[in-house]
Amino acid sequence: MSSTTKHLTKSKDMRQPLIVGNWKMNGSLAANQDLLLAIKAGMDKATCGVAVCVPGPYLQQVQQLCEGKALLLGAQDVSAHEQGAFTGEVSAAMLRDFGVRFAIVGHSERRQYHAETDAVVATKAQRALSAGITPIVCVGETLAEREAGQTHAVVKRQLAAVIHTNGHCISEIVVAYEPVWAIGTGQTASPEQAQEVHALLRAQLSAATAQPERIALLYGGSMNPSNAASLLAQPDIDGGLIGGAALKAADFLTIVAAASH
Ligand code: PEP
């Protein structure tokens, strides 16, 4: 084992793996209950952190259903504003009222359909941190950017904005590398492709904080029961952000089990 690999492996041992479900705009009171009861029933052997990021209207329901289990509650977005005349927005303090521990910021669907810029994403991360919520900062390149050889430049730029705005708090974030071309497409980055970008992000974070080992780096993009173990075995992949497979209890639990070794 090279000294670099040894160093990375040691750091990985210090980080608890984390599996986060992103339900997107899916669910109903009845479906959520069935899904969560099944997940809770199968979580006894989980040693990794497990969270579900649910649509806003279901926060209270899911908060109650998660009670007493090591299943943490997350939101899929947070306002860049603190409070006031921002119709339709939900503040970090409001999320905190429901026991929210994580908030996804900068998901590619928000960047794409809601024109969220790097600066807005960085401010959202800041709002979450101020309320004691861990932002899960999503970065990732489109297929066109990958094919143009811009992957490294794109993810570095996206993460740099968050580092710039959040300074010494940066060790409190979680980062999710989500290649846009892999989200919801069934096309997953290979473990080598994902590891290469994760190593780059790890190096960027190491230059920004004295405590880079605190930061979990998740992979997201069609992670499923068949590919989870090989992705999670990579030295810089600490967990997963799971979309489609988070809506099926058996699939989600298989991924949780793969992260629990
Ligand atoms: C996501 O939306 O964050 C995601 C990773 O989705 P999927 O797993 O469905 O690709």
Image (tube, rainbow, N blue to C red):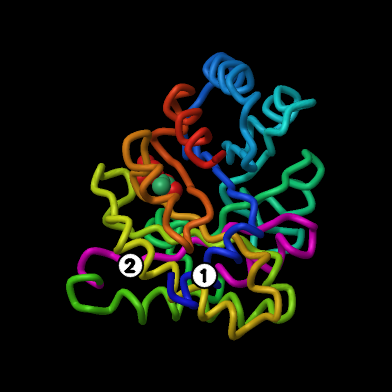
Residue 245's image quarter?
A: top left
Residue that badge 2 annotates: 141
Ligand 1 neighbours mark 1 (CB distance < 8 Å) = no
N-term mark: 2 or 1: 1
Location of the C terminus by quadrant is top right
Q: 58 or 86, which is in the foreground? A: 58
User: Is 138 a magenta residue?
Assistant: yes
Question: In the visual, does 67 lie left or right of 224?
Answer: right
Residue that badge 1 annotates: 6
Query: Which residue is found at the position 49% from the left and 61% from the top?
Result: 138
* Residues shaded magenta: 121-145
Q: Which mark is residue 82?
A: none
Location of the N terminus by quadrant is bottom left
Query: Which residue is found at the position 75% from the left and 24% from the top?
Result: 64
Residue 164's image quarter?
A: bottom right
Helix, strand or loop for disc 1: helix
Looking at the rendered structure, the kind of residue marked 1 is Lys
Helix, strand or loop for disc 2: loop
Looking at the rendered structure, the kind of residue marked 2 is Glu
The picture places residue 257, in percent across and down from the top left corner, at 51, 33
For the residues labelled 2 and 1, the Cα–Cα distance comes to 29 Å
User: Is 116 a magenta residue?
Assistant: no
In the rendered image, the vertical position of residue 42 relative to residue 225, given as above or below: above
